[in-house]
Image (cartoon, helix red, strand yellow):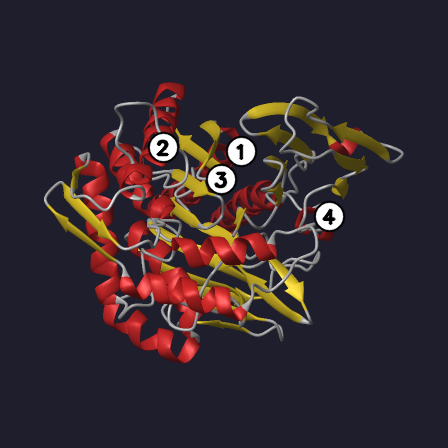
């Protein structure tokens, strides 16, 4: 018994170390909160922590000095954002609806507005 | 006992080594910061992310893209004394142009030949006709007589490039929308390689992308925006490569039950879309940008032969929800 005890102990320690390392690797990491940034051309308009949003609220984007652009209403709620209204002709930004996946974007090319969501996702980039 | 001790030491050492690799890999993926920039150029947003890069390197890329986008803008009049694509589009005289402009025009003519005319750099008038219709507050299909006239004008015009001398004959407008972003990313890729960076992603309006690896050395996972709030139909895994995508989700309109876009067939003059998107994957972003447009027009069957000839991968997503891709790509259907 004494002869094999050390072998048994060796195996036990090996298994314990392996399990510990495996547990560390598989232990769930805290999710990065979903953030939305809203740009007009290259100017940052809003940097929002969507995880902290509660009731739905609207953000008005307006460019009175630029008659080639139209007003837009962006709505935010907990972990989601959408273009609620836009004066652009094709309405593709509105048709996107509520977006809540990280690394997705909503673009209004007509109004040169870019909304980008950052956070944790299995997908790194969308085309 | 001695044998057991040796075995124990070896086994423990290998466990710790593999565990340390695991821990270090997960730690690096959560702690690396990228130098990033967003630029509004080429009528879209260009995102630059350089892992272990610097803000100065991102700025240099932004400066290059800004000057190049101005050079190939065929519609905005440049400052006095400057020669850009606008200048080419406003004279039928032979003119001297900057070498960078001559190079991209030569590339456009080479790709016209390589695609047997599916790419036509003189498509500007036809493209603008459709753009006016598709982007109107009430979208409309241009009158057939106007389409026929624009098509005839395009076919009666020509573009020649000899060194830095360029001559346009006829009234058709040179439009480099199908290749400008991708061609620009060729130079950006060289700049990034010159900085010694291997982990990066540059995304020009989703239509043209270049990428190294992710910060932890793994491949990028790419989803497809097919519009209407739908989830991606597939995930493409890619690294150290480039990709061009032509899509109707952001620039198109539904008229009479069919979808029309800004992507015009140079043979028929029609901009009726048969696909939601088409992508071309290969090491040259300039070729990918051109071929994504051409694949979109050709359809899967014809595209396959060009893809094989050019060594490109491809993806298609149609209006019936079918996602088709070349067998060489690593794709997971969702």
Q: Which of marks 1 and 3 is nearer the N terminus?
A: 1
Query: Tag 2: Cα neighbours inside 10 Å, few (<14), some, or many (≥20)?
Result: some
Residue B328 locus on image (x, y percent): 36, 69
Q: Can residue B236 be seen in this view?
A: yes
Q: Horizontal placement of B78 versus B97: left or right?
A: right
Which of the 4 image quadrants contains residue B35?
top left
**Which residue, given by chain and number where applicable, does mark 3 sit on?**
B43
**Which residue, given by chain and number where applicable, does mark 2 sit on?**
B70
Residue at the limit of the structure toward the bottom, as seen here: B301
Query: Going 63% across and 59% down the picture, which residue do you hit?
Result: B253
**Which residue, given by chain and number where applicable, does mark 4 sit on?**
A94
As measured in the structure, the alpha-carbon distance from the residue carrying label 1 to the one carrying label 3 is 33 Å
In which chain is the residue bearing label 4?
A: A
As measured in the structure, the alpha-carbon distance from the residue carrying label 1 to the one carrying label 4 is 34 Å
Q: Horizontal placement of B332 versus B240: left or right?
A: right
Depicted B300 relative to depicted B64: above or below: below
**SS class of the residue under badge 2?**
helix
Residue at the limit of the structure toward the top, as seen here: B56
């Amino acid at each position: 018994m004494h002869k094999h005890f050390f072998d048994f102990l060796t195996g036990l320690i090996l298994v314990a170390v392996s399990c510990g390392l495996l547990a560390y690797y598989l232990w769930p990491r805290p999710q990065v909160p979903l953030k939305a940034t809203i740009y007009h051309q290259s100017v940052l308009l809003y940097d929002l922590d969507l995880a902290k949003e509660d009731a739905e609220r609207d953000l008005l984007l307006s460019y009175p000095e630029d008659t080639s652009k139209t007003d837009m209403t962006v709505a935010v709620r907990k972990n989601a954002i959408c273009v609620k209204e836009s004066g652009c002709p094709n309405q593709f930004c509105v048709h996107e609806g509520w977006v809540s996946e990280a690394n997705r974007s909503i673009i209004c090319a007509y109004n040169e507005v870019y909304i980008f969501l950052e956070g944790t996702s299995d997908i790194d980039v969308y085309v | 006992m001695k044998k057991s001790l040796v075995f124990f030491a070896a086994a423990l050492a290998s466990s710790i080594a593999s565990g340390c690799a695991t821990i270090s890999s997960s730690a690096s993926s959560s702690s690396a910061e990228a130098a990033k920039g967003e630029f509004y150029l080429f009528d879209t947003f260009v995102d630059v992310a350089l892992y272990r890069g610097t803000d100065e390197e991102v700025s240099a890329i932004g400066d290059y893209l800004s000057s190049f986008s101005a050079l190939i803008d065929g519609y905005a009049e440049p400052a006095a004394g400057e020669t850009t694509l606008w200048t080419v589009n406003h004279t039928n005289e032979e003119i001297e142009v900057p070498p960078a402009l001559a190079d991209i025009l030569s590339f456009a003519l080479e790709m016209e030949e390589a695609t047997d005319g599916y790419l036509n750099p003189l498509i500007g008038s036809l493209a603008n006709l459709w753009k006016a219709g598709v982007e109107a507050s009430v979208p409309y299909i241009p009158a057939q007589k106007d389409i026929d006239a624009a098509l005839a004008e395009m076919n009666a015009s020509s573009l020649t490039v000899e060194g830095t001398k360029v001559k346009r004959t006829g009234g058709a407008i040179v439009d480099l929308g199908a290749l400008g972003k991708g061609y620009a990313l060729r130079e950006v890729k060289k700049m990034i390689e010159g900085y010694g960076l291997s982990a990066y992603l540059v995304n020009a309006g989703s239509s043209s992308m270049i990428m190294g690896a992710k910060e932890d050395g793994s491949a990028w996972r790419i989803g497809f925006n097919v519009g209407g709030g739908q989830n991606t139909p597939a995930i493409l895994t890619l690294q150290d490569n480039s990709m061009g995508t032509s899509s109707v989700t952001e620039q198109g309109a539904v008229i009479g039950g069919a979808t029309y876009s800004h992507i015009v067939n140079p043979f028929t003059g029609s901009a009726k879309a048969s696909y939601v998107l088409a992508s071309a994957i290969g090491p040259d972003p300039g070729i990918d940008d051109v071929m994504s447009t051409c694949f979109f027009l050709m359809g899967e069957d014809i595209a396959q032969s060009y893809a094989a000839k050019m060594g490109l991968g491809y993806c298609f997503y149609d209006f019936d929800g079918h996602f088709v891709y070349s067998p060489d790509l690593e794709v997971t259907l969702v």
